[in-house]
Amino acid sequence: MTISVGETFPNVTVKTWDDAPVDLSVGDLIAGKTVVIFGVPGAFTPTCSMRHLPGFVDHYEAIRAKGVDIIAVHSVNDPYVLNTWNKDQGHEGIETLADWDATLAKALGVDADMSKTGLGTRAVRYAAIVRDGEVTYFETGGLEVSGAEAILEALDVD
């Protein structure tokens, strides 16, 4: 079952990067803050690298100007790959949520078997706006609902 608007965003532990992989409680990250979290099937995959993350890099300041404290990218990847990808994309201000074992993807209900394309279990493409732990926007699907432009529009009505 996929998480819905009005529900509490799952408090699970993922990995992030601080000169090395470190545990990060998602609940601690989002407590008392307005956070945009977007999920991608994989670092260095074509759409994720050419359009999804770059959109958030390009619109980083505009999203932050709408009262967003943190922008985070979630992927079922290890923290080394996710950190390198984020650096490669040119914006280390975007928090990385490395979900190496798909715990967060499963808790959100966005896990998918992508074995046919060689990726194994991954997260589907999604975006969320979370205010002090409560989900106020959650959509899965293409960039028209999960990209930076969709988030900018949702922040206007959210």
Image: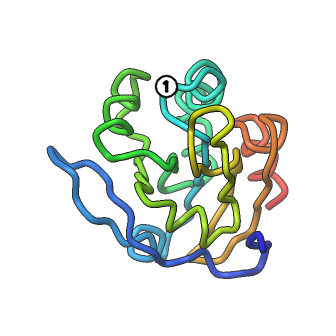
* Residue found at the very far left of the displayed protein: 19
Depth check, front residue: 23 or 65 = 23
Which quadrant is the N terminus positioned in? bottom right
Badge 1 density bin: few <14, some 14–19, many ≥20, Cα 10 Å: some
Q: Residue at x 55, y 23 (%)?
A: 49
Is 103 placed left or right of 144 in the picture?
Answer: left
What is the x, y in percent for residue 119?
Answer: 56, 38
**In the rendered image, which quarter is residue 120 located in?**
top right
In the figure, is residue 118 to the left or right of 149?
left
On the image, the x and y values in percent for residue 115 come to 63, 42
Check the image and report above or below for 147 versus 34: above
Residue on which the image places disc 1: 44
Q: Nearer the viewer, residue 125 or 65?
A: 125
- Residue 26 at x, y percent in the picture: 44, 70
Answer left or right for 81 relative to 141.
left
- Quarter residue 60 falls in: top right
Q: Quadrant of the C terminus?
A: bottom right
Tell me what residue is drawn at x 55 percent, y 45 percent.
64
Q: Is residue 4 above or below residue 8?
A: above
Please report the residue visible at 63 percent of the width from the left and 49 percent of the height from the top.
Answer: 66
Q: Specify the color scheme.
A: rainbow
The residue nearer to you, when weighing 1 against 87, is 1
Q: Amino acid at mark 1?
A: Phe
Q: Secondary structure at mark 1?
A: loop
